[in-house]
């Protein structure tokens, strides 16, 4: 019954695609990646499709408006809900665009960063939108939520109100490059004793991951291993303090090897219960996660600070 609506939504997304926006008569190689009109249209289309997908608890429509780790996380969330016969997660509506940070780009893919206020959760979501080519729509690829009272650093402005991109090089003689910051944060999540733990500010997410890994390691009859890896960083903005604002995705693998004949009770509603409950005798297997983190790399060499995160299970390998 929903197929005609989904087809119309997908068609409208494709029809809205256009070439790289630029002022009339401008023949320069670089163009503004996106305008506020582009951002408002992308968000409106996204919320419309998300509403349909959430109501049906079906992630397939999201492929028209999401990509990358965002699509993986939402698909995993829906799959857990289906496995446990839960209701779909309630999504906030009425998101308010706070700003649009678009760089100058000379070629596809294009991207822009858009902080939006989420009144339902009293948080700011820092959305990252990406467009692979002119014939495709904008897709949401990341949306970490700010934590606590975190304030976003001001980006360095470029021409025509754009933002300056932080490259792979170090932003100053003291600070880390965007990729180094992501790699350092991922390595610090390996445990409290990791050398990299001294190079970050241990936030609530880090503390939670450390505590969870320690608790899993104490499970009777279970051998537990956790692995973290930072993906390639594609989006980073230069900030006025001489540092950078980095949007990174971390891959996490939690492997459980349950001894034969042992029974493990997983927390109700957890991904472990959804994927590793083998009919009373828990199965061995690996849960795969993606975590989007918003990192501030101070230009003065101070420890890396996580300003926001969003994550979830993306799949499982069960034996």
Image: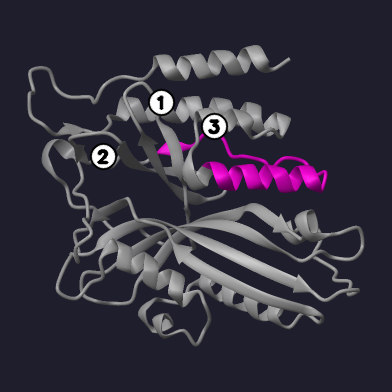
- Where is mark 2, residue-wise? 102
Residue 317 appears at what percent x and percent y? 69, 57
The residue closer to the viewer here, 40 or 249, is: 249
Residue 137: which disc?
1
Relative placement, left or right, of 178 versus 50 is left
Q: Residue at x 66, y 16 (%)?
A: 3
- Where is mark 3, residue-wise? 63
Residue 305 appears at what percent x and percent y? 38, 69
The answer to whether 14 is drawn above or below residue 316 in the figure is above
Q: Residue at x 85, y 69 (%)?
A: 265
C-alpha distance separating marks 3 and 1:
11 Å
The residue closer to the viewer here, 126 or 284, is: 284
Q: Residue at x 15, y 69 (%)?
A: 172
Q: Which residues are magenta?
A: 71-97
Secondary structure under the numbered disc 3 in the rendered image: helix
Q: Is residue 83 magenta-colored?
A: yes
Q: Label 1 crowding class (10 Å Cα cut-off): few <14, some 14-19, many 20+?
A: many
């Amino acid at each position: 019954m929903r197929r005609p609506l989904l087809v119309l939504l997908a068609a409208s997304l494709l029809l809205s695609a256009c070439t790289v926006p630029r002022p009339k008569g401008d023949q320069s190689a670089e163009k503004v990646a996106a305008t506020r009109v582009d951002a408002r249209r992308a968000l409106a289309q996204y919320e419309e499709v998300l509403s349909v997908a959430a109501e049906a608890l079906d992630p397939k429509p999201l492929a028209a408006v999401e990509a990358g780790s965002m699509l993986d996380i939402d698909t995993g969330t829906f799959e857990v809900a289906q496995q446990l016969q839960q209701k779909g997660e309630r999504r906030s509506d009425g998101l308010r665009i706070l700003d649009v940070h678009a760089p100058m780009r000379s070629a596809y893919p294009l991207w822009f960063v858009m902080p939006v206020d989420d009144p339902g959760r009293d948080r700011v979501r820092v959305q990252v939108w990406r467009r692979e080519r002119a014939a495709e729509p904008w897709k949401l690829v990341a949306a970490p939520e700010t934590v606590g009272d975190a304030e976003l650093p001001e980006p360095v402005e470029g021409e025509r109100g754009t933002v300056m991109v932080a490259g792979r090089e170090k932003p100053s003689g003291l600070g880390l490059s965007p990729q180094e910051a992501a790699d350092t944060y991922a390595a610090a999540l390996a445990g409290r004793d990791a050398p990299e733990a001294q190079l970050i500010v241990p936030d609530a997410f880090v503390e939670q991951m450390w505590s969870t890994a320690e608790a899993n390691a104490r499970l009777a009859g279970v051998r537990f291993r956790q692995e973290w890896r930072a993906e390639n960083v594609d989006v980073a903005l230069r900030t006025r303090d001489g540092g950078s604002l980095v949007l990174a995705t971390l891959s996490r693998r939690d492997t459980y090897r349950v001894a034969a004949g042992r029974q493990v009770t997983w927390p109700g509603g957890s991904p472990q219960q959804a994927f590793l409950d083998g009919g009373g005798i828990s199965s061995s297997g690996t849960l795969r996660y993606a975590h989007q983190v918003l990192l501030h790399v101070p230009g003065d060499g101070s420890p890396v600070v996580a300003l926001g995160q969003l994550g979830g299970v993306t799949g499982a390998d069960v034996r």
